[in-house]
Structure formats: structure tokens, C-alpha cells
Amino acid sequence: MRGAIELAQRNNWPNVQFEGDCWNIIQKIREKKLDDSKVRPILEDALQLLAAVDNWDISHTKREGNCVAHLMAHEAKTNKDCNLLLSDDVLAAIQADLSFD
């Protein structure tokens, strides 16, 4: 998620729709709800970054609905010879997300 938010910031995209497959985190970000759970640092980071994005929304998608992104990330992580035709910004966002797997 962090990589996607940073990508939106760098490109100054005015309207951004984010999706994620972790319902708990998505709900807390939508509600801007901080608690004392283990995910609080993730929420604080996401909300701080989102403050710089003009108009955003975030929604939950089932992992099955996110399967293309998941398969691409898994392939890139496990196969060093994998070549994906992506812009540098998109590739950096995927690599950043892989560091959390």
C-alpha cells in the first residue's frame, strides 16, 4: 500500500482509488481509526502519506480479485529472471510491497 500511495504522490494524481486485500487495515484507514493494535504503525504511516493525496478512497478486494497483482508479485519475488514491462514507478511500488510479504 505504501508504494502505491507514494506513486500517487510523485505523479500528483488528483483522484486515486486504492485497493487492498486486508479488510482490517482497509477499514481502519477508511475510518482514520488508530488503536493500540500491532498494525498501528502501518496505519499511521498510511494516513500520514494519504494526507498529501488530494482526493482518495480505499476499498477492500478479496485476494481472489487481486490475483493478477499477487501472481505478478510472487513471480517477481521468486524468479530473478522474470521480466515485467512496467514503468520504473510501478516496479518500485511492487518491490516496496514485496518487502512486507
Image (tube, rainbow, N blue to C red):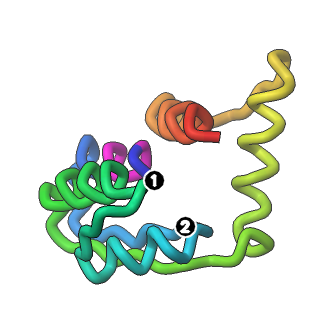
Question: First in sequence: mark 2 or mark 1?
Answer: 1
Where does the C terminus fall, quadrant-wise? top right
Q: Amino acid at mark 1?
A: Met
Which numbered tag is attached to residue 23?
none
Would residue 18 be found to the left or right of residue 82 on screen? left
Q: Nearer the viewer, residue 4 or 31?
A: 31
Q: Nearer the viewer, residue 99 or 73?
A: 99
* Vertical side of 76 occupied by 70: above or below: below
What segment is highlighted magenta in the picture?
3-7
Where residue 24 sits in the image (x, y, percent)? 50, 74
Q: Amino acid at mark 2?
A: Gly
Which numbered tag is attached to residue 1?
1
Q: Quadrant of residue 65?
A: bottom right
| Majority secondary structure of magenta residues | helix
* Vertical side of 21 occupied by 47: above or below: above
* Vertical side of 30 occupied by 45: above or below: above
Q: Quadrant of residue 17?
A: bottom left
Would residue 75 be found to the left or right of residue 44 on screen? right
Q: Are marks 2 and 1 in contact (CB under 8 Å)?
A: yes
Q: Can you identify the residue that label 2 sits on?
A: 20
Identify the residue at image location x=73%, y=33%.
Answer: 84
Q: Across the whole image, how many numbered discs are drawn on residues?
A: 2
Q: Describe the element under mark 1 as helix, strand or loop.
A: loop
